[in-house]
Every structure is written in C-alpha cells, then in structure tokens.
Image (cartoon, rainbow, N blue to C red):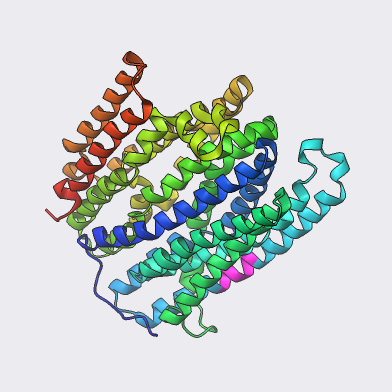
Amino acid sequence: MKAPFGRSLLPDDLGGMTLAVVGGSIGALLGSTVARILAARMLTPADFGLLLTAVGAASVFGGILSLGLNPAAARRIAALREGKSPEAMHSTATTALKIAILSGGSGLLGLIILGTALNHFAAMLPTSWRLLGRTLVGVSPIALALPVGMAVLGVCRGFGEVRGRAVFRDGFGGLLRAGLVGLAGLIGGGTALFAFAFGLSSLGTEGIFLIYGRWRGWFGNFRSWDGKLLKSLAPFCALEILGQVQAWLDLAIVALLENPVQVGYFGIARGLVRATRMLAGAASHGYLPLASAAHQRNDSESLGIAYGRSRLLSLALIWIPLAFFLFSPSELLILLAGEAYAPAAPILRILALALLIDVLPGYLGPTLEATGHAAVQARIRVLSLGVGLIAMLLLTHLDGAKGTALGLLFMALVRNLLLGTSLWRLLAPDRASLRPGSVVPTAILLLASGAACRILLPGLPPLLIAIATGVPGAILLWLNPTARRTG
C-alpha cells in the first residue's frame, strides 16, 4: 500500500495526532509498567536491580547506535514534503533504515561478545553482580531493535503518520512486552529469563513496526541513497548520545556507587516516571515535523501556536499520575510492587518533580531542532550533563539513590533554564506563545494546595489529596481553548 502524498501539516492537526499517539502510549505505558511490576514481584530488589542494569545498558547502547535517525529523518522528510518531493522522501526513508540495520547489527554482536566475556570472568565480579553477563546476553536484541525502531519512527513522523506508532510500536509493543514477561514468570522467572523476555519483546515490537512501514510504502528502492541525510546526522547523533547519557546516567551512577538493592528501589520509581514521560512526549510526535514545516515556510505564527498547544497537551496528560507520585508515593508503590519497595517513595516524589520541571516549559529542545539549532541544544546538554554528573556523584555518595534523584532534579533545572534562555534569544518568538496563561498557574496552585494539605492535615488520606489535585488540574489544562483551536 503506497503512502499518500498529503498536504502540509498544520497546527490544527496536532490535537488529533496527539490523541492517536496517546492511545498507543497508554498501551505501551501499561505494558511496560505491568512488565516491570511482574518482574519486581517475582524478584528480590537486588535481582530486579540487576535486571534493570542490563536493560539500561542495552537500551543506552542501542539508543546511541540509532545515531539520531529519528529526529534527523523526521525533519528531512517533513522538509521534502513541503517541497513536494515524494521520491526523495522514500529515498531518505530507505537510507535511514539501511544505516540503522548496519549500526544495530554491529551493536547486537558487540553486546553478545561483552556479555559472554563477563560471564566467563564472573568469578572476578562481586557476588551480587555475577549474573550480569548472562543477563546482558538475554537483553542483547535491544541493541538491534532500537536503532531500527527509531529510524522507522522518524520516517513515520516525517510522513505525518500516527497509526503505525500508536497501534503497532506502542500498543502492540506494550502488550507483547507484558505477555512475554508474564510468560517468563510462569515458566519460573530468574533474571536471565526475564532479560530474554525483555530483549525478545523489543525485537518483535520494532520488527512489526518495520513491516507496517514497508506495507505503507514509506521505503523506496533499497538501492536508493540520500547523502544529505547522512551529512545531517552529526548534530542529531551528538544529541542522541547526550540524550541517552542523560536518560540513563542516573541509573548508571546508582549501579556503580551503590548495591543492586538500591538500584531496585531507584529502578521501580524511575520506571513509573519514565512510563509517564511517554504521555508527556505524545504531542512531540506531531510537533517536530509540524514545527519543521512551519519554519521551512517561514510561518512563525503557526510555529508559535503549535508550541503553546503542545505544551498544554503535554501537561494535561501527565497531571493525574504526577499528583499520585507527589502525594501518595508510598501507597502507590506498595499497591503495585509490594511492601519490599516502600523505601522507594521519596525517590519517586523527587523524580516526579524533575518530570514537572521538564514538561512545564514546553518542547524547548525539539523547537531548537526544528529551527536548525540542534548544535545549540547539543552544547546545552553537554553543559547540563556535566553539572548533573557532579551533582549526582556528590549527592549519591551522601544519600544513596535518593541523592541521585536530587542530582537529577538539579540537572533538569539547569538544562531547562539554559534551553529557555537560548530559545528566547535565538528565535525571538512571539512572547504571547511562551506565556503560561492563567490556566497553568491555576493548575500549579492546585499542586501547592495539595502539598499544604499534606503538611497541615496529616490525617487526610493521601490518595484523596492526589485525586483532588490531579483530576481538576488535568481538566483545566486539557480544556484550555489554546489547546484545542487556533488563534
């Protein structure tokens, strides 16, 4: 089935695209969360921490090997779409896929070799880490799956398509992950078996997504080649490396400086927050190509409208889980993972604050990427990562995994301050598009009221506070007129 060559993307498309992605994201969120909870309930915090360390290592490796093909392909194809160049779009898509297969294949082989070597010299490792090599071999398919999946995702975004991501990559992928992890638990569990379930589910998910892309006709002749895509990869590749380091640095620090039990506590809280980030990122699927297209045609008004709208949509989608993370973390963790993970409650609350800081300003980074300032974003990420690394190392030494979370919070503050300042200076956007409007301060006031109730009325049920602050805030943000219509 050949993909239709459609019209230009407009701000009015953003709401529908976001809702479609949210549908799939809920499936992915539930699948990922269920998979982690099943593994956490069947493993000790130490074994669960070992599993998360291996999954994290494979994910960051595979993410780096994606070489930034997701935003690079999305931006390139969106620009070609504005120029009415369908054949060039298909050539770009094919080039992205070929690069991803080569890169991911080498990553799969490398991870198998590393895991086998660690397993061979397991006696030299601390007792709690001796199964790391076998677990790394189990998750090794992630190193191939992620580059291919990220390349196909970039193509999907560039073509203005949503269904493939929502139904196959997110929805089906979440179900497959939960199903395979559940099957591993029925068979008998164990870190190596759970690791293989995570690896196989990742490979199956991205494979189905690729098949869908081929059926939609996104890819042209396999011999075609887009040299301009390859030449444009450098800043996007740097951003991807920085993004992966930023995404996994916290877990790596806990794994290096603490024991697997602390990794387990940090990992369960981190997993819940990362799943919620999927909702926060739903609007970015359509926003980056939309913003790139608006910039291509010098339509600053559409760019400003899309920026403000995507910001409110993102906040609305995370507001309810955010309230539960902030006001009833203990109750939530005990309900989901069991009493053994109750010590992770302070970590969950701090990570939720970091999430709020990242989402509150809107899509600062993608806006810089869409307008040709990816290098500026890369420099900011380097600086904020350096600051965050120092903060996390010091605070982890002082307060374990909770200190790591505090360092992550500080890094989020620094990064968003620098991104916002740079965006304001470089683009000189319409000031109205960056103002929060009355609805955002009102929603934040609800959170502040909840915090006051938590302190002044300790007898009030935490779940009641979470509901009373989360639901009205989400409704206010979602129903704000600028989130639904233009002008």
Residue 424's image quarter? top left
Q: Where does the N terminus fall, quadrant-wise?
A: bottom left
| Position in image of residue 158 (x %, y %) | 37, 68
Q: Residue furthest front?
A: 186
| Type of secondary structure dominating the magenta stretch | helix
Residue 47 appears at what percent x and percent y?
Answer: 70, 41
For the residue pair 483 and 427, the one nearer the viewer reads as 483
Up/down of 202 relative to 472, above or below = below
In the figure, residue 177 lies in which quadrant?
bottom right
Q: Which of these two is toward me, 23 or 86?
A: 23
Residue 118 position, x and y percent, is 81, 49
Residue at image point 82% right, 39% down = 125
Residue 73 visible in image = no
224 left or right of 451? Answer: right
Q: Is residue 370 magenta?
A: no
Residue at x 26% of width, y 41% of height: 474
Magenta region, residue range: 98-104
In the rendered structure, the answer to whether residue 6 lies left or right of residue 355 reads left
Relative image position of residue 449 (x, y in whole percent): 26, 23
Asked if 120 appears above or below 263 in the picture, the reply is: below
The foreground one among 89 and 439 is: 439
